[in-house]
Image (cartoon, rainbow, N blue to C red):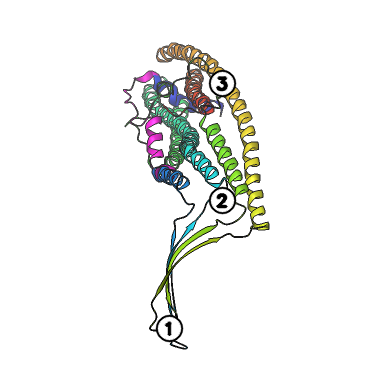
Amino acid sequence: MRVHAIALAILCGAGAAAQPRTIEPAATTLRQAFEAAWSRQPEAAALRLRHDAARARQDAAQAWTPEPPALAISNKTDRFNRDLGARELEVGVAIPLWLPRERSSSSALADAEAAGVESRALAARLRLAGVLREAWWQWQRAQVDVDLARDQLTNARLLAADVERRVKAGDLARADQHQADGAVAAAEAAAARAQAAGASAAQQLRVAMAGTPPTASSATQPAGAAQLAAEPEPPNDPGPPDAAAHPAIQDLQHRVAVADRNAALSAVRTRANPELLIAATRERHLRNERYDPSITLALRIPFGAGSRESARTASVQAEAIELQAQLALERKRLAAEYEASRQRVGSARALVAAAERRARLANESRGFFEKSFRMGESDLPTRLRIEAEAVEAQRQAASARIELAAAISQWRQALGLLPE
């Protein structure tokens, strides 16, 4: 049982020493995947219209009236009762008027909303980057597992063929043939599991990319390719996220500003807007009389809204307080996330150095025992044990490179930096 388990490890080890492969670079980078995913996001599709709406609100706040004027037309006649020829025709314009301080408050609110459009889009891009980064490196881990499983299967078959020839020549026992065939069966099972996990990871990445499938090279990336595709580290350890630059903080700050301006406007709008009516009237009392012209100037002042307006004011003030508390919590969360991600990068870098050193030593030992096995100086179980150690070392080195690249991505995410 132990020898059979060791035989499973041969899959990757012997393959790495068998012959080097020419690996093509990936056709899709993390940045390209991010741009493709963002182009399909609802926020990206609506961004231009949101800018147009913000500019329209600013123009409306600078207008002379809070609402467009209305045309008022009325016609009065006694045709259907006395029919003495009485007529009255009135044509006028109803002009809404700003409440005191309403225009300046509306302009401040429109400016705050316009400033928040871009920060809202940047925050959405950063959230998408976080989801995509997680799915991307999970896919990379699955790609490495698929690559190692394929190598394991190829090398297990090569070893089984070699053992079969030596069994026929009388150099090895029949039991060794069973062990080698068992290693092939185990390698086939491992390759199938890796393929299934790779398909699942690719599907998750496809979901994160809004339906765009990731494109990879014809050959799966090797363990070292992920390190070359890693994002650049932030220069000179910039420190905790800067509130003036982090998209999540900027978005919340602008939302707080909008809520404050909205609360200020709600405090001003204690009633509906008054209206000024200017009308021209032509009237007569009898059929043969001349029409007398007149001018009407009227002012309509609504009463206060009372409890309805108080409820709306309390609602917008509550929203402002909630956003301010959320902003304080977000600052603390980002500071903690930055510190954790920075420490994770340091630990991952140390792990890569140790894993690569172990893989190099295990590979050298594998070469020694491979020659010894060919010369008949060591048995098959010993070679399988050495191969198992080399395979595990190679797997740890590949995983360490992926974890370092993922840690750098998480570090950049905590700093509010988009994929590069």
Q: Which amino acid does label 1 sit on?
A: Leu
User: Does residue 267 sit above or below 364 in this rendering?
Assistant: below
Q: Which of 94 and 193 is in front in this view?
A: 94
**In which quarter of the view is residue 166 placed?**
top left
Circle 2 or circle 3, nearest the eye: 2
Report helix, strand or loop for mark 2: loop
Where the N terminus falls, by quadrant? Answer: top right
Is any atom of residue 106 visible in this view?
Answer: yes
Question: Which label is found at residue 342?
Answer: 3
Magenta run includes residue 82: no
Q: Position of residue 256 (x, y in %)?
A: 58, 38
**Which segment is the magenta one?**
17-45
Residue type at tag 3? Arg
Q: In this view, does 239 lie to the left or right of 125?
A: right
Distance from disc 1 to disc 3, alpha carbons, whole Å, reads 93 Å
Disc nearer the start of the sequence (1/3): 1
Give whichever of 170, 78 is nearer the camera: 78
Quarter of the image where one finds residue 59? top left
**x 40%, y 45%: residue:** 52
Q: Which mark is residue 141?
A: none
Q: On the image, numbered disc 1 is attached to which residue?
A: 286
Along the horizontal axis of the image, is 39 left or right of 412?
Answer: left
Q: Residue at x 64, y 32 (%)?
A: 328
Q: Position of residue 348 (x, y in %)?
A: 54, 20
State the SS at label 3.
helix
**Residue pointed to by mark 2:** 99
Q: In the image, 239: left or right of 232?
A: right
- Crowd rating for badge 3 (residues with CA inside 10 Å; few <14, some 14–19, many 20+): many
Measured in 3D between alpha carbons, the distance from the residue under mark 1 to the one under mark 2, in whole angstroms, is: 43 Å
Residue furthest to the front in view is 289
> Residue 384: in sight, yes or no?
no
Rendered position, 27 above or below 302: above
